[in-house]
Amino acid sequence: MDMAFIIETIVKIVVILLVFSALAGLGTYFERKVLAFMQRRLGPMHVGPFGLLQVAADGIKLFTKEDIIPQNVVKPIFKIAPVITAATAFMASAAIPFWPQFTAFGYTVHPIVADVNIGILYVLGVMAIGLYGPLLGGMASANKFSLISAARSAAVFISYEVISGLSLLAPLMMVGSLSLVDINNYQAGGIGNWIVWSQPVAFILFWIAAFAETGRTPFHLVANDHEIIDGFGTEYSGMRWGLFFIGEYANMFFISFVIAIIFLGGFGDGTIAGAFQLLLKVAFFFFFFLWTRAAWPDVRPDQLMWLCWKVLMPIAVINVVITGLVMMF
Amino acid sequence: MHSEPLNDRNVSEQSPYYYVDIEEYPTTGWDKFKQVVKRTFRGELFVGLWVVMRELVKFNIHTVKYPLEKLPIGPRYRAVHKLLRLWESGYERCIGCGLCEKICISDCIRMDTKIDENSRKEVTEYSINLGRCIFCGYCAEVCPELAIVHGQRYENGSEQRSHFVIKDDMLTPLDFLTSGQQTEYPGFGSINPNESVTKTPLAY
Protein backbone atom coordinates (compact mmCIF):
# COMPACT_ATOMS: atom_id res chain seq x y z
CA MET A 1 0.00 0.00 0.00
CA ASP A 2 1.82 3.06 -1.18
CA MET A 3 1.41 6.65 -0.12
CA ALA A 4 -0.26 7.77 -3.35
CA PHE A 5 -3.07 5.29 -2.88
CA ILE A 6 -3.72 6.46 0.66
CA ILE A 7 -3.73 10.12 -0.34
CA GLU A 8 -5.98 9.40 -3.31
CA THR A 9 -8.45 7.52 -1.12
CA ILE A 10 -8.53 10.28 1.49
CA VAL A 11 -9.13 12.88 -1.21
CA LYS A 12 -12.00 10.77 -2.60
CA ILE A 13 -13.54 10.37 0.85
CA VAL A 14 -13.35 14.10 1.53
CA VAL A 15 -14.83 14.92 -1.87
CA ILE A 16 -17.71 12.50 -1.39
CA LEU A 17 -18.39 13.79 2.13
CA LEU A 18 -18.41 17.40 1.02
CA VAL A 19 -20.39 16.85 -2.18
CA PHE A 20 -23.10 14.77 -0.59
CA SER A 21 -23.39 16.93 2.52
CA ALA A 22 -23.96 19.89 0.22
CA LEU A 23 -26.32 17.84 -1.93
CA ALA A 24 -28.30 16.95 1.18
CA GLY A 25 -28.80 20.65 1.80
CA LEU A 26 -29.69 21.30 -1.82
CA GLY A 27 -31.97 18.27 -1.67
CA THR A 28 -34.04 19.94 1.04
CA TYR A 29 -34.29 23.04 -1.16
CA PHE A 30 -35.47 21.01 -4.14
CA GLU A 31 -37.87 19.05 -1.98
CA ARG A 32 -39.45 22.20 -0.62
CA LYS A 33 -39.67 23.76 -4.06
CA VAL A 34 -41.08 20.69 -5.81
CA LEU A 35 -43.62 20.05 -3.05
CA ALA A 36 -44.61 23.71 -3.09
CA PHE A 37 -45.14 23.82 -6.85
CA MET A 38 -47.16 20.62 -6.76
CA GLN A 39 -49.34 22.17 -4.06
CA ARG A 40 -49.71 25.54 -5.89
CA ARG A 41 -47.37 27.30 -3.48
CA LEU A 42 -44.10 29.12 -4.07
CA GLY A 43 -41.86 27.58 -1.46
CA PRO A 44 -38.84 29.45 -0.10
CA MET A 45 -38.59 32.78 -1.92
CA HIS A 46 -37.04 35.44 0.27
CA VAL A 47 -33.48 34.35 1.10
CA GLY A 48 -31.40 34.98 -1.96
CA PRO A 49 -32.56 34.64 -5.58
CA PHE A 50 -35.53 32.25 -5.72
CA GLY A 51 -34.79 31.36 -2.09
CA LEU A 52 -31.59 29.55 -3.04
CA LEU A 53 -29.69 30.82 0.00
CA GLN A 54 -32.33 29.26 2.24
CA VAL A 55 -30.00 26.26 2.29
CA ALA A 56 -27.23 28.39 3.77
CA ALA A 57 -29.61 29.98 6.27
CA ASP A 58 -30.82 26.57 7.40
CA GLY A 59 -27.25 25.36 7.71
CA ILE A 60 -26.22 28.32 9.84
CA LYS A 61 -29.28 27.81 11.99
CA LEU A 62 -28.58 24.11 12.50
CA PHE A 63 -24.91 24.65 13.32
CA THR A 64 -25.43 27.49 15.78
CA LYS A 65 -28.51 26.20 17.54
CA GLU A 66 -28.20 25.08 21.14
CA ASP A 67 -27.54 21.36 21.47
CA ILE A 68 -30.11 20.31 24.04
CA ILE A 69 -29.67 17.03 25.90
CA PRO A 70 -32.90 16.41 27.81
CA GLN A 71 -32.73 15.34 31.43
CA ASN A 72 -33.94 11.74 31.39
CA VAL A 73 -32.30 10.50 28.21
CA VAL A 74 -29.57 7.86 28.16
CA LYS A 75 -26.90 10.38 27.37
CA PRO A 76 -24.12 8.45 25.56
CA ILE A 77 -26.56 6.59 23.35
CA PHE A 78 -28.63 9.71 22.73
CA LYS A 79 -25.49 11.51 21.59
CA ILE A 80 -24.14 8.76 19.35
CA ALA A 81 -27.39 7.86 17.53
CA PRO A 82 -27.43 10.67 14.92
CA VAL A 83 -23.77 9.99 14.17
CA ILE A 84 -24.65 6.38 13.36
CA THR A 85 -27.28 7.45 10.85
CA ALA A 86 -25.04 9.92 9.04
CA ALA A 87 -21.89 7.79 9.25
CA THR A 88 -23.49 4.61 7.93
CA ALA A 89 -25.09 6.52 5.08
CA PHE A 90 -21.69 7.83 4.01
CA MET A 91 -19.90 4.54 4.71
CA ALA A 92 -22.33 2.79 2.39
CA SER A 93 -21.27 5.11 -0.40
CA ALA A 94 -17.72 3.72 -0.32
CA ALA A 95 -18.55 0.90 -2.74
CA ILE A 96 -20.67 2.96 -5.15
CA PRO A 97 -19.03 3.99 -8.45
CA PHE A 98 -20.27 7.54 -8.90
CA TRP A 99 -18.58 8.18 -12.22
CA PRO A 100 -16.74 6.06 -14.79
CA GLN A 101 -12.98 6.02 -14.44
CA PHE A 102 -11.27 8.89 -16.19
CA THR A 103 -7.76 10.15 -16.76
CA ALA A 104 -6.76 13.54 -15.47
CA PHE A 105 -3.21 14.86 -15.97
CA GLY A 106 -2.01 11.41 -16.96
CA TYR A 107 -3.35 9.85 -13.78
CA THR A 108 -6.23 7.36 -13.97
CA VAL A 109 -8.85 8.07 -11.32
CA HIS A 110 -11.38 5.48 -10.19
CA PRO A 111 -14.25 7.48 -8.68
CA ILE A 112 -15.04 4.76 -6.17
CA VAL A 113 -13.50 4.71 -2.71
CA ALA A 114 -13.16 0.94 -2.42
CA ASP A 115 -13.82 -1.31 -5.41
CA VAL A 116 -14.48 -4.36 -3.26
CA ASN A 117 -15.72 -7.52 -4.93
CA ILE A 118 -18.74 -7.70 -2.61
CA GLY A 119 -19.83 -4.12 -3.35
CA ILE A 120 -23.61 -4.40 -3.25
CA LEU A 121 -23.52 -6.72 -0.24
CA TYR A 122 -21.41 -4.14 1.57
CA VAL A 123 -23.75 -1.29 0.59
CA LEU A 124 -26.86 -3.12 1.74
CA GLY A 125 -25.19 -4.30 4.92
CA VAL A 126 -23.97 -0.88 5.97
CA MET A 127 -27.30 0.70 5.09
CA ALA A 128 -28.90 -1.93 7.31
CA ILE A 129 -26.67 -0.81 10.20
CA GLY A 130 -28.23 2.62 9.67
CA LEU A 131 -31.23 1.14 11.44
CA TYR A 132 -29.41 1.67 14.72
CA GLY A 133 -29.64 5.45 14.37
CA PRO A 134 -33.44 5.71 14.63
CA LEU A 135 -33.63 2.67 16.90
CA LEU A 136 -31.12 3.83 19.53
CA GLY A 137 -32.07 7.49 19.20
CA GLY A 138 -35.72 6.68 19.72
CA MET A 139 -35.16 4.30 22.60
CA ALA A 140 -32.76 6.63 24.43
CA SER A 141 -35.00 9.67 24.09
CA ALA A 142 -37.27 9.06 27.11
CA ASN A 143 -40.23 10.02 24.93
CA LYS A 144 -43.06 7.69 24.07
CA PHE A 145 -43.41 8.98 20.54
CA SER A 146 -39.72 8.41 19.94
CA LEU A 147 -40.13 4.93 21.37
CA ILE A 148 -43.00 4.13 19.00
CA SER A 149 -40.86 5.44 16.17
CA ALA A 150 -37.94 3.27 17.25
CA ALA A 151 -40.14 0.17 17.30
CA ARG A 152 -41.58 1.00 13.92
CA SER A 153 -38.20 1.68 12.36
CA ALA A 154 -36.87 -1.65 13.64
CA ALA A 155 -39.86 -3.47 12.17
CA VAL A 156 -39.78 -1.65 8.84
CA PHE A 157 -36.04 -1.75 8.24
CA ILE A 158 -35.62 -5.41 9.15
CA SER A 159 -38.66 -6.46 7.10
CA TYR A 160 -37.64 -4.58 4.02
CA GLU A 161 -34.05 -5.80 4.20
CA VAL A 162 -35.64 -9.11 3.21
CA ILE A 163 -37.30 -7.57 0.18
CA SER A 164 -34.26 -5.65 -1.02
CA GLY A 165 -32.02 -8.68 -0.50
CA LEU A 166 -34.29 -11.20 -2.20
CA SER A 167 -35.17 -8.90 -5.09
CA LEU A 168 -31.49 -8.24 -5.77
CA LEU A 169 -30.73 -11.95 -5.72
CA ALA A 170 -32.21 -12.53 -9.19
CA PRO A 171 -30.15 -9.85 -11.01
CA LEU A 172 -27.05 -10.92 -9.10
CA MET A 173 -27.58 -14.51 -10.24
CA MET A 174 -27.59 -13.25 -13.82
CA VAL A 175 -24.52 -11.07 -13.42
CA GLY A 176 -22.57 -13.50 -11.28
CA SER A 177 -20.78 -10.78 -9.34
CA LEU A 178 -21.50 -8.61 -6.31
CA SER A 179 -19.30 -5.73 -7.44
CA LEU A 180 -21.27 -2.71 -8.61
CA VAL A 181 -18.61 -2.06 -11.27
CA ASP A 182 -19.12 -5.57 -12.66
CA ILE A 183 -22.89 -5.13 -12.58
CA ASN A 184 -22.46 -1.88 -14.46
CA ASN A 185 -20.16 -3.42 -17.06
CA TYR A 186 -22.64 -6.28 -17.55
CA GLN A 187 -25.07 -3.68 -18.94
CA ALA A 188 -22.48 -1.69 -20.88
CA GLY A 189 -23.92 -2.74 -24.25
CA GLY A 190 -26.60 -0.07 -24.25
CA ILE A 191 -30.21 0.38 -23.35
CA GLY A 192 -31.21 -3.09 -24.54
CA ASN A 193 -28.86 -4.70 -22.02
CA TRP A 194 -30.32 -3.01 -18.99
CA ILE A 195 -31.30 -5.47 -16.28
CA VAL A 196 -34.64 -3.72 -15.84
CA TRP A 197 -35.87 -5.40 -19.07
CA SER A 198 -35.00 -8.90 -17.92
CA GLN A 199 -35.85 -8.32 -14.23
CA PRO A 200 -38.76 -5.84 -14.13
CA VAL A 201 -40.28 -7.47 -11.04
CA ALA A 202 -37.03 -7.25 -9.12
CA PHE A 203 -36.71 -3.61 -10.19
CA ILE A 204 -40.16 -2.70 -8.83
CA LEU A 205 -39.58 -4.66 -5.61
CA PHE A 206 -36.21 -3.05 -4.96
CA TRP A 207 -37.65 0.36 -5.68
CA ILE A 208 -40.44 -0.21 -3.15
CA ALA A 209 -37.90 -1.48 -0.61
CA ALA A 210 -35.80 1.64 -1.24
CA PHE A 211 -38.72 3.78 -0.12
CA ALA A 212 -39.03 1.74 3.07
CA GLU A 213 -35.31 1.82 3.82
CA THR A 214 -34.97 5.56 3.37
CA GLY A 215 -38.24 6.10 5.23
CA ARG A 216 -39.79 8.21 2.50
CA THR A 217 -43.40 9.06 2.16
CA PRO A 218 -45.56 6.08 1.36
CA PHE A 219 -43.60 4.36 4.14
CA HIS A 220 -42.80 7.43 6.20
CA LEU A 221 -44.23 5.99 9.39
CA VAL A 222 -40.92 6.05 11.30
CA ALA A 223 -41.29 9.82 11.67
CA ASN A 224 -44.87 10.55 10.74
CA ASP A 225 -45.48 14.14 11.75
CA HIS A 226 -49.20 13.84 12.33
CA GLU A 227 -49.00 10.70 14.47
CA ILE A 228 -45.72 10.70 16.39
CA ILE A 229 -44.40 14.26 16.04
CA ASP A 230 -40.94 13.78 14.50
CA GLY A 231 -40.52 10.23 15.73
CA PHE A 232 -36.96 9.49 16.79
CA GLY A 233 -35.99 13.10 16.07
CA THR A 234 -38.45 14.63 18.52
CA GLU A 235 -36.01 15.29 21.34
CA TYR A 236 -33.10 16.30 19.11
CA SER A 237 -32.11 19.83 18.29
CA GLY A 238 -29.43 21.64 16.38
CA MET A 239 -26.80 19.71 14.49
CA ARG A 240 -27.66 16.34 16.04
CA TRP A 241 -31.04 16.55 14.39
CA GLY A 242 -29.23 17.88 11.31
CA LEU A 243 -27.13 14.71 11.18
CA PHE A 244 -30.29 12.61 11.03
CA PHE A 245 -31.41 14.85 8.22
CA ILE A 246 -28.15 14.64 6.29
CA GLY A 247 -28.16 10.89 6.76
CA GLU A 248 -31.68 10.58 5.35
CA TYR A 249 -30.96 12.69 2.28
CA ALA A 250 -27.57 11.10 1.66
CA ASN A 251 -29.30 7.72 1.84
CA MET A 252 -31.81 8.88 -0.74
CA PHE A 253 -29.02 9.88 -3.11
CA PHE A 254 -27.03 6.69 -2.57
CA ILE A 255 -30.00 4.38 -2.99
CA SER A 256 -30.86 6.28 -6.17
CA PHE A 257 -27.33 5.59 -7.40
CA VAL A 258 -27.70 1.92 -6.50
CA ILE A 259 -31.02 1.54 -8.34
CA ALA A 260 -29.66 3.34 -11.39
CA ILE A 261 -26.47 1.27 -11.47
CA ILE A 262 -28.03 -2.14 -10.88
CA PHE A 263 -31.17 -1.88 -13.00
CA LEU A 264 -30.81 1.03 -15.41
CA GLY A 265 -27.36 0.48 -16.81
CA GLY A 266 -25.38 2.84 -14.57
CA PHE A 267 -22.85 4.85 -16.53
CA GLY A 268 -22.97 2.41 -19.44
CA ASP A 269 -19.78 2.10 -21.43
CA GLY A 270 -17.99 4.72 -19.36
CA THR A 271 -18.03 7.65 -21.73
CA ILE A 272 -18.85 11.15 -20.54
CA ALA A 273 -22.31 10.84 -22.10
CA GLY A 274 -22.90 7.67 -20.11
CA ALA A 275 -21.77 9.39 -16.93
CA PHE A 276 -24.22 12.23 -17.44
CA GLN A 277 -26.92 9.69 -18.18
CA LEU A 278 -26.20 8.17 -14.78
CA LEU A 279 -26.67 11.56 -13.16
CA LEU A 280 -29.96 12.00 -15.03
CA LYS A 281 -31.20 8.62 -13.82
CA VAL A 282 -30.21 9.44 -10.24
CA ALA A 283 -31.94 12.81 -10.55
CA PHE A 284 -35.09 11.06 -11.72
CA PHE A 285 -35.10 8.63 -8.83
CA PHE A 286 -34.46 11.45 -6.36
CA PHE A 287 -37.26 13.46 -7.95
CA PHE A 288 -39.53 10.46 -7.66
CA PHE A 289 -38.94 10.42 -3.89
CA LEU A 290 -40.26 13.99 -3.76
CA TRP A 291 -43.02 13.33 -6.28
CA THR A 292 -44.54 10.51 -4.26
CA ARG A 293 -44.37 12.64 -1.15
CA ALA A 294 -46.70 15.14 -2.81
CA ALA A 295 -48.98 12.53 -4.34
CA TRP A 296 -49.39 9.53 -2.07
CA PRO A 297 -50.78 9.01 1.41
CA ASP A 298 -48.93 7.07 4.07
CA VAL A 299 -49.80 3.47 4.84
CA ARG A 300 -50.42 2.14 8.32
CA PRO A 301 -47.69 0.08 10.00
CA ASP A 302 -49.78 -3.10 9.85
CA GLN A 303 -50.45 -2.52 6.15
CA LEU A 304 -46.74 -2.08 5.63
CA MET A 305 -45.99 -5.39 7.33
CA TRP A 306 -48.80 -7.05 5.38
CA LEU A 307 -47.37 -5.70 2.13
CA CYS A 308 -43.88 -6.88 3.02
CA TRP A 309 -44.49 -10.40 4.27
CA LYS A 310 -47.64 -11.45 2.44
CA VAL A 311 -47.18 -9.80 -0.95
CA LEU A 312 -43.67 -8.63 -1.74
CA MET A 313 -41.67 -11.45 -0.17
CA PRO A 314 -43.57 -14.26 -1.96
CA ILE A 315 -43.25 -12.37 -5.24
CA ALA A 316 -39.52 -11.91 -4.65
CA VAL A 317 -39.05 -15.62 -3.89
CA ILE A 318 -41.05 -16.65 -6.96
CA ASN A 319 -38.98 -14.24 -9.02
CA VAL A 320 -35.76 -15.82 -7.78
CA VAL A 321 -37.06 -19.34 -8.50
CA ILE A 322 -38.22 -18.44 -12.02
CA THR A 323 -34.92 -16.70 -12.76
CA GLY A 324 -33.08 -19.81 -11.57
CA LEU A 325 -35.22 -22.10 -13.74
CA VAL A 326 -34.72 -19.89 -16.80
CA MET A 327 -30.95 -19.81 -16.23
CA MET A 328 -30.82 -23.58 -15.72
CA PHE A 329 -32.65 -24.56 -18.90
CA MET B 1 -76.64 26.21 -10.95
CA HIS B 2 -79.66 27.44 -9.02
CA SER B 3 -80.19 26.21 -5.53
CA GLU B 4 -83.87 25.24 -5.97
CA PRO B 5 -83.29 21.65 -7.13
CA LEU B 6 -80.96 21.16 -4.17
CA ASN B 7 -83.64 22.05 -1.65
CA ASP B 8 -85.45 18.76 -2.14
CA ARG B 9 -83.17 16.42 -0.32
CA ASN B 10 -85.07 13.24 -1.14
CA VAL B 11 -83.22 11.00 -3.55
CA SER B 12 -85.33 10.62 -6.68
CA GLU B 13 -85.07 10.77 -10.46
CA GLN B 14 -85.41 14.56 -10.56
CA SER B 15 -83.21 15.52 -7.64
CA PRO B 16 -79.47 15.96 -8.07
CA TYR B 17 -78.85 13.91 -4.94
CA TYR B 18 -77.83 10.29 -5.27
CA TYR B 19 -76.56 7.54 -3.06
CA VAL B 20 -72.81 7.04 -3.06
CA ASP B 21 -71.92 3.75 -4.64
CA ILE B 22 -70.20 1.80 -1.88
CA GLU B 23 -69.37 -1.79 -2.62
CA GLU B 24 -70.15 -4.55 -0.16
CA TYR B 25 -67.22 -5.48 2.01
CA PRO B 26 -65.70 -8.79 0.88
CA THR B 27 -66.33 -11.68 3.23
CA THR B 28 -64.77 -14.73 1.62
CA GLY B 29 -61.08 -15.07 1.09
CA TRP B 30 -61.44 -15.22 -2.69
CA ASP B 31 -63.41 -11.96 -2.71
CA LYS B 32 -60.77 -10.27 -0.57
CA PHE B 33 -58.08 -11.48 -2.95
CA LYS B 34 -60.02 -10.12 -5.92
CA GLN B 35 -60.37 -6.77 -4.19
CA VAL B 36 -56.65 -6.60 -3.53
CA VAL B 37 -55.83 -7.45 -7.15
CA LYS B 38 -58.32 -4.88 -8.43
CA ARG B 39 -56.95 -2.16 -6.18
CA THR B 40 -53.38 -3.06 -7.06
CA PHE B 41 -53.76 -2.89 -10.81
CA ARG B 42 -56.33 -0.12 -11.13
CA GLY B 43 -53.50 2.39 -11.22
CA GLU B 44 -54.89 4.84 -8.70
CA LEU B 45 -51.38 5.64 -7.53
CA PHE B 46 -50.60 6.89 -11.01
CA VAL B 47 -53.68 9.11 -10.95
CA GLY B 48 -52.23 10.78 -7.85
CA LEU B 49 -48.86 11.15 -9.52
CA TRP B 50 -50.49 12.64 -12.62
CA VAL B 51 -52.55 15.15 -10.64
CA VAL B 52 -49.58 16.66 -8.79
CA MET B 53 -47.41 16.60 -11.93
CA ARG B 54 -50.15 18.48 -13.79
CA GLU B 55 -50.12 21.17 -11.11
CA LEU B 56 -46.32 21.35 -11.28
CA VAL B 57 -46.40 21.89 -15.05
CA LYS B 58 -49.35 24.31 -15.05
CA PHE B 59 -47.52 26.39 -12.43
CA ASN B 60 -50.75 28.03 -11.33
CA ILE B 61 -49.46 29.49 -8.08
CA HIS B 62 -52.05 30.67 -5.59
CA THR B 63 -49.66 32.23 -3.11
CA VAL B 64 -50.30 35.86 -2.15
CA LYS B 65 -46.92 37.41 -1.43
CA TYR B 66 -48.37 39.16 1.56
CA PRO B 67 -46.29 42.20 2.38
CA LEU B 68 -46.03 42.98 -1.33
CA GLU B 69 -49.53 41.94 -2.36
CA LYS B 70 -52.68 42.20 -0.28
CA LEU B 71 -56.05 40.61 -0.65
CA PRO B 72 -59.00 43.02 -0.81
CA ILE B 73 -61.01 43.14 2.38
CA GLY B 74 -64.70 43.77 2.82
CA PRO B 75 -65.98 47.36 3.23
CA ARG B 76 -67.23 46.55 6.72
CA TYR B 77 -64.18 44.61 7.80
CA ARG B 78 -63.89 44.93 11.56
CA ALA B 79 -60.33 46.04 12.20
CA VAL B 80 -59.02 48.69 14.58
CA HIS B 81 -61.60 51.35 15.43
CA LYS B 82 -61.78 54.91 14.13
CA LEU B 83 -63.48 58.00 15.51
CA LEU B 84 -64.89 60.14 12.72
CA ARG B 85 -65.52 63.88 12.38
CA LEU B 86 -68.45 65.79 10.97
CA TRP B 87 -67.94 66.58 7.30
CA GLU B 88 -69.23 70.16 7.35
CA SER B 89 -67.66 71.50 10.51
CA GLY B 90 -64.87 69.18 11.37
CA TYR B 91 -66.29 68.84 14.87
CA GLU B 92 -66.13 65.46 16.57
CA ARG B 93 -69.17 63.34 15.92
CA CYS B 94 -68.99 61.66 19.30
CA ILE B 95 -71.54 63.18 21.68
CA GLY B 96 -70.34 61.29 24.70
CA CYS B 97 -73.53 59.34 25.18
CA GLY B 98 -71.64 56.33 26.52
CA LEU B 99 -73.70 53.71 24.68
CA CYS B 100 -70.59 52.02 23.30
CA GLU B 101 -69.13 51.85 26.79
CA LYS B 102 -72.35 50.22 28.02
CA ILE B 103 -72.80 47.70 25.23
CA CYS B 104 -69.17 46.56 25.03
CA ILE B 105 -69.36 42.91 26.03
CA SER B 106 -65.73 42.63 26.90
CA ASP B 107 -65.85 45.88 28.84
CA CYS B 108 -62.86 47.41 27.11
CA ILE B 109 -64.08 50.90 26.14
CA ARG B 110 -63.46 53.72 28.60
CA MET B 111 -64.42 57.35 28.10
CA ASP B 112 -64.29 60.54 30.15
CA THR B 113 -66.63 63.42 29.41
CA LYS B 114 -67.23 66.88 30.72
CA ILE B 115 -69.65 69.72 30.05
CA ASP B 116 -67.89 72.43 28.12
CA GLU B 117 -68.56 76.17 28.21
CA ASN B 118 -71.42 75.86 25.69
CA SER B 119 -73.03 73.30 28.01
CA ARG B 120 -72.29 70.72 25.28
CA LYS B 121 -70.89 67.38 26.30
CA GLU B 122 -67.29 67.00 25.29
CA VAL B 123 -65.28 63.78 25.21
CA THR B 124 -61.95 64.31 26.92
CA GLU B 125 -60.66 60.73 26.95
CA TYR B 126 -61.63 57.77 24.81
CA SER B 127 -59.68 54.54 24.79
CA ILE B 128 -60.21 50.93 23.81
CA ASN B 129 -58.23 48.17 25.49
CA LEU B 130 -57.25 46.07 22.46
CA GLY B 131 -55.97 43.37 24.77
CA ARG B 132 -59.57 42.61 25.59
CA CYS B 133 -61.46 43.82 22.51
CA ILE B 134 -62.93 40.92 20.54
CA PHE B 135 -63.85 43.12 17.55
CA CYS B 136 -67.51 42.18 17.79
CA GLY B 137 -68.60 45.49 16.29
CA TYR B 138 -71.33 46.24 18.82
CA CYS B 139 -69.88 49.66 19.61
CA ALA B 140 -70.03 50.67 15.96
CA GLU B 141 -73.52 49.24 15.65
CA VAL B 142 -74.95 50.99 18.66
CA CYS B 143 -73.39 54.38 17.98
CA PRO B 144 -76.25 56.81 17.14
CA GLU B 145 -73.96 59.33 15.46
CA LEU B 146 -71.84 56.93 13.36
CA ALA B 147 -68.95 58.33 15.31
CA ILE B 148 -67.09 55.15 16.20
CA VAL B 149 -66.66 52.79 13.27
CA HIS B 150 -64.31 49.96 12.45
CA GLY B 151 -61.47 50.83 10.14
CA GLN B 152 -59.61 48.74 7.57
CA ARG B 153 -56.27 48.80 9.33
CA TYR B 154 -55.43 45.22 10.24
CA GLU B 155 -51.64 45.47 10.34
CA ASN B 156 -51.23 46.15 14.03
CA GLY B 157 -47.55 45.47 14.52
CA SER B 158 -46.42 47.65 17.38
CA GLU B 159 -44.56 47.56 20.64
CA GLN B 160 -47.80 48.03 22.53
CA ARG B 161 -51.36 47.33 21.55
CA SER B 162 -52.41 50.57 23.18
CA HIS B 163 -50.60 52.50 20.48
CA PHE B 164 -53.63 52.32 18.22
CA VAL B 165 -56.50 53.15 20.48
CA ILE B 166 -56.13 56.28 22.49
CA LYS B 167 -58.33 59.05 21.25
CA ASP B 168 -55.65 60.93 19.30
CA ASP B 169 -54.86 57.83 17.26
CA MET B 170 -58.45 56.98 16.42
CA LEU B 171 -59.79 60.43 15.68
CA THR B 172 -59.53 61.54 12.07
CA PRO B 173 -56.94 64.35 11.90
CA LEU B 174 -58.33 67.64 10.66
CA ASP B 175 -56.08 67.81 7.61
CA PHE B 176 -57.26 64.33 6.62
CA LEU B 177 -60.80 65.60 6.75
CA THR B 178 -60.14 68.65 4.62
CA SER B 179 -58.26 66.63 2.04
CA GLY B 180 -61.17 64.19 1.89
CA GLN B 181 -59.35 61.18 3.31
CA GLN B 182 -62.02 60.39 5.88
CA THR B 183 -63.96 57.47 4.43
CA GLU B 184 -67.43 56.23 5.16
CA TYR B 185 -68.42 52.61 4.69
CA PRO B 186 -70.95 52.01 1.90
CA GLY B 187 -74.28 50.25 2.13
CA PHE B 188 -77.08 50.07 4.63
CA GLY B 189 -77.03 52.60 7.42
CA SER B 190 -74.21 54.65 6.01
CA ILE B 191 -74.27 58.38 5.45
CA ASN B 192 -73.82 60.21 2.22
CA PRO B 193 -70.86 62.54 2.62
CA ASN B 194 -72.46 64.97 0.17
CA GLU B 195 -75.41 65.49 2.47
CA SER B 196 -74.05 67.40 5.37
CA VAL B 197 -74.19 65.74 8.71
CA THR B 198 -74.73 68.53 11.13
CA LYS B 199 -74.00 68.99 14.73
CA THR B 200 -76.96 68.11 16.89
CA PRO B 201 -78.54 71.40 18.01
CA LEU B 202 -78.73 72.09 21.68
CA ALA B 203 -82.37 73.12 21.67
CA TYR B 204 -85.21 72.03 19.42
Image (cartoon, rainbow, N blue to C red):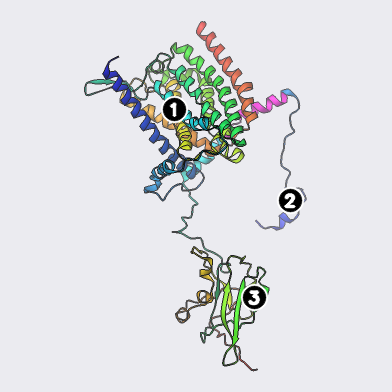
Tell me which corner region of the image, top left, top right, bottom left or bottom right, holds residue B36.
Answer: top right
Q: Residues within 10 Å of mark 1 (few under 14, many from 20)?
A: many
Q: Position of residue A37 (x, y in %)?
A: 47, 44
**Quadrant including the N terminus of chain A:** top left
Which marked residue is nearer to the observer: mark 2 or mark 3? 3
**B192 or A48: which is nearer to us?**
A48
Q: Residues within 10 Å of mark 3 (few under 14, many from 20)?
A: some
**In terms of sequence position, does the residue under pointer 2 or pointer 3 come before the other?**
2
Question: Which segment is the magenta one?
Answer: B30-45
Report which residue position mark 1 lands on: A87
Which label belongs to residue B15?
Answer: 2
- Label 3, secondary structure: give it: helix
Identity, as a three-letter code, of the amino acid under mark 1 = Ala
Whether A84 is drawn above or below A319: the answer is below
Is residue A218 visible in the rendered structure shown here? no
Chain letter belonging to callout 2: B
- Label 2, secondary structure: give it: loop
Q: Is residue A77 left or right of residue B14?
A: left
Whether A93 is drawn above or below A37: the answer is above
Chain letter belonging to callout 3: B
Q: Is residue B151 magenta?
A: no
The CA distance from mark 2 to mark 3 is 52 Å
The CA distance from mark 1 to mark 3 is 67 Å
Is residue A63 visible in the rendered structure shown here? yes
Which residue is drawn at the image coordinates 54% and 26% (left, top)? Answer: A208
Report which residue position mark 3 lands on: B101
- Label 1, secondary structure: give it: helix
Identity, as a three-letter code, of the amino acid under mark 3 = Glu
Q: Is residue B185 left or right of residue A183?
A: right
Which marked residue is nearer to the observer: mark 2 or mark 1? 1
Prevalent SS, magenta region: helix
Identity, as a three-letter code, of the amino acid under mark 2 = Ser
